[in-house]
Amino acid sequence: MIFAVSAACASEPSQPRERPRIEAAVERGLGERVHVPLRVRCVWIPPRCRATLPDGSHLPVWLGVRHGEIVWRLDGALVFADDIEAYLREALADLGAPQTAECGARVQAIAARDRVPCQLQHGGKAFVTVNADGTTSIEIVLDAVAAAARAEPVSDESLLQMSRKLEHADGDDEE
């Protein structure tokens, strides 16, 4: 079924590219969700699209066929920096450390368990993790040095090695 769509959307190399209906439909539907202008381009082998936002960031779009109709969905969770930043402002004020936060692209598609890093006004960082079920967790690190260290990606193996070093360091104090 997808191959039929591919053939229908192809244009002759000598002719200008005709905008496929699926691109227009995805652009319209996604634009209603994100409330910013965007441009959608699709490729058909493998079938997928990419929406480009005004800031140049991209949202991956999955394409499929259900009951003979082409369907689409964002490939990942959709997060809005404005919402995260507003929440962080309130949380930071509740902690007695009022300040602003900057969380990057205004609209982002992220995979489950990915972190959205946010820079805090006074040098700290906040990390928002979006879980597969749509819930979120937030980590706020006010100290700039600790925030920089926490921002570094750490593998499970590295954590295990650090833990073992700390175990051995504790034993050195007892001598």
Image (cartoon, grey):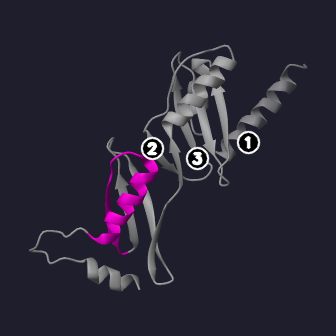
**Mark positioned earlier in the residue sequence (2 or 3):** 2
Q: Residues within 10 Å of mark 2 (few under 14, many from 20)?
A: many
Q: Which residue is mark 3?
A: 114
Residue 149 visible at all = no
Quadrant in which the N terminus appears? bottom left
Which stretch appears magenta? 20-45
- Alpha carbons under labels 2 and 3: distance apart: 15 Å
Residue 60 against residue 53 in the figure, above or below: below
Q: Nearer the viewer, mark 2 or mark 1?
A: 2
Rendered image quadrant of residue 107: top left
- Alpha carbons under labels 2 and 1: distance apart: 35 Å
Question: Is-magenta flag for residue 146?
Answer: no
Question: Is-magenta flag for residue 26?
Answer: yes
- Alpha carbons under labels 1 and 3: distance apart: 21 Å
Q: Are marks 1 and 3 in contact (CB under 8 Å)?
A: no
Q: Which mark is residue 107?
A: 2
Instruction: Name the residue rendered at 51%, 18% in the picture.
Output: 121
Tell whether 162 sits left or right of 154. Answer: right
Instruction: Name the residue rendered at 51%, 83% in the picture.
Output: 67
Q: Which residue is mark 1?
A: 160
Q: Looking at the image, which residue sits at the far right?
A: 174
Residue 137 visible at all = yes
Q: Where residue 113 sits: x, y (%)?
A: 63, 49
